[in-house]
Amino acid sequence: SDDVDDYPLTYTYGYRLVQDAALTPLVADQYASAWFLTTLPQAPNVNITCIGRVFDRYLSYAQGFTPVRVDALEISTEDLSAFAGDLLSASADTGDGEAALSLVSNVASVIGGTNTSRRRLSTEQELIDDLMAHTISAASLVGTGSSAAAAAQVLFTVSTLTGDPASLSESSQTGAIGLLREVVGDAAKHGIDDDTAAATAATVSSLLDASLFASGAADTSIDGQMAGTVGALATGMIAGAYGGQNRSVVTDNLELRAFRTDCGTRDAAFRLSSGTGVTDLPASALDAAGGGGCEGGAPADVDVKVVRLKNVYASEGDGAISDLLQIELGGEGTTVEVDNLAEPIVFDIPFDYDPTLEAGYDPGIRTGTCYNRSQVLSFDCDVPTTFDCGEPRVVTLPDGSTTTVTSANLPLEITVSCPAKTAACSFWDNATTSWSSDGCAVVASTASGVTCACRHLTDFAASTTAANADYFVDFQPSPGPTPAPTTVQPSLAPTSMPSPGPTTRPTWVPWPAPTTARPTPRPSPAPT
């Protein structure tokens, strides 16, 4: 129609793989131009139908369609890189963010393919870096903060680019994590549909397998962005739900479930399939989140978000032994800080079976000998245990008196009662960028899980602690001029004994622990 009231006209473009299949859009929103240039994802020789629609100002539309055959692309990585570079440059010149995102996603589908085990060429990684840079640039043009469709297009594009974590450089990983945090945070305000949530979860899971999270060395900035993205994803998934409904998504490195509670579902256990989750959510916690009481009124629904993900904060030697458990409360599109609760929130954290955490497990004893003050004995206990031979120690004698043992008393035979490990509840303290247990207590523990009670909400993990070791010392008969070995292995007796000395018999006395915190010492053998 050429009726002036029909203007302006707008257009959409998409395709169907088979008759009656869902229409796959090529642009996120209605398009201002009557023509559109695009590429299509790689496909193994399929027939599709391309469909264009023209809308008047009242959103009435007419459509046209044409069948097309798509053949598999036979092109080298170098030629593809050059071809994609030309297309991306042309797209960037137009300032058309939607067309650029569609192009990036389609090129990525060609280089990604289905074989993720093959060796990646350096030119291919450079192309992915270039595509990621174009994606970040295009995302700023499409208005992800105001359009759910634009946010979905960006998230699907990033998902395609990150499908093979081995092909991602650290710069691409960093760019993807930052873009996810921004776009998912914006999308959470107006909701995230199931398909977009699944694509985003797959992206998170893939990135958690990439090199930035595989080294075991925590980068608190990157880690915090990833944890924040997952929290925002949970918020967006449950936005718009009714009371009593829940949404969930599961991948290899991530399991997320968001619940919208009402008065009929507030007493439920909010758990994941892995066994992780909340077993007791007190009314005071729901009140703190703005829910209000259920007696005589219409309380607000409260969102309970429970997430298990690969522990992004864990680093070697920090004691963390489980995935990260993220628990959040909030309302429609928001998250509420929950702290200093009158009643604790109780939850379970499972971890891989550890026989040293079994009840009644005996960690055993180890022995070593100090021959010179420069030695530091290392004992092969379950918990790393050392003894500094050069450090003066105050010991108690059988008659109750004390004396200071120094290097003049060498050689000394040291016996250590290895410390036992126990499961503990920890949370990541953003203020100190370290694990803490303040406000948390262990309710129960086994060799494969711990039940925690905490008076605040954040990111939790199971960890292990151990008391200080108990040391005992046996004076050798004489500190004669025995050649001193350069190293001493635990539990290894010297090959030759010093010459006979004073007639006093060896006396066993407790050796004080390095700190004031220590378990009850074992009984010392009576003097002979």
Image (cartoon, helix red, strand yellow):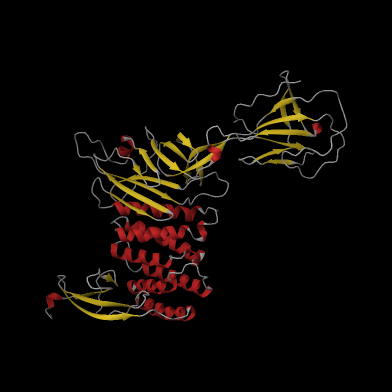
Residue occupying image coordinates x 73% and y 34%: 414
Vertical arrangement, residue 431 with respect to residue 441, above or below: below
User: Of residues 256 and 57, which is closer to you in this image?
Assistant: 256
User: Of residues 463 and 75, which is closer to you in this image?
Assistant: 75
Q: How many marks?
A: 0
The answer to which quarter of the image holds residue 69 is bottom left
The answer to which quarter of the image holds residue 379 is top right
Q: With 424 as the anchor, is 472 left or right in this view?
A: right
User: Of residues 88 and 382, which is closer to you in this image?
Assistant: 382
Q: With 178 as the anchor, is 376 left or right in this view?
A: right
Q: With 342 as the anchor, is 518 left or right in this view?
A: right
Q: With 405 as the anchor, is 210 left or right in this view?
A: left
Residue occupying image coordinates x 59% and y 29%: 519
Percent across and percent down for residue 508 are: 73, 26
Quadrant assignment for the C terminus: top right
Percent across and percent down for residue 345 are: 38, 37
Vertical arrangement, residue 396 with respect to residue 175, above or below: above
The answer to which quarter of the image holds residue 84 is bottom left
Residue 85 showing in the rendered view:
yes
Percent across and percent down for residue 88 are: 40, 77
Residue occupying image coordinates x 72% and y 41%: 376
Quadrant assignment for the N terminus: bottom left
Vertical arrangement, residue 27 with respect to residue 422, above or below: below
Q: Give the residue at the far top of this rendering.
A: 399
Percent across and percent down for residue 275 are: 40, 44
Residue 390 showing in the rendered view:
no
Vertical arrangement, residue 97 with respect to residue 424, above or below: below
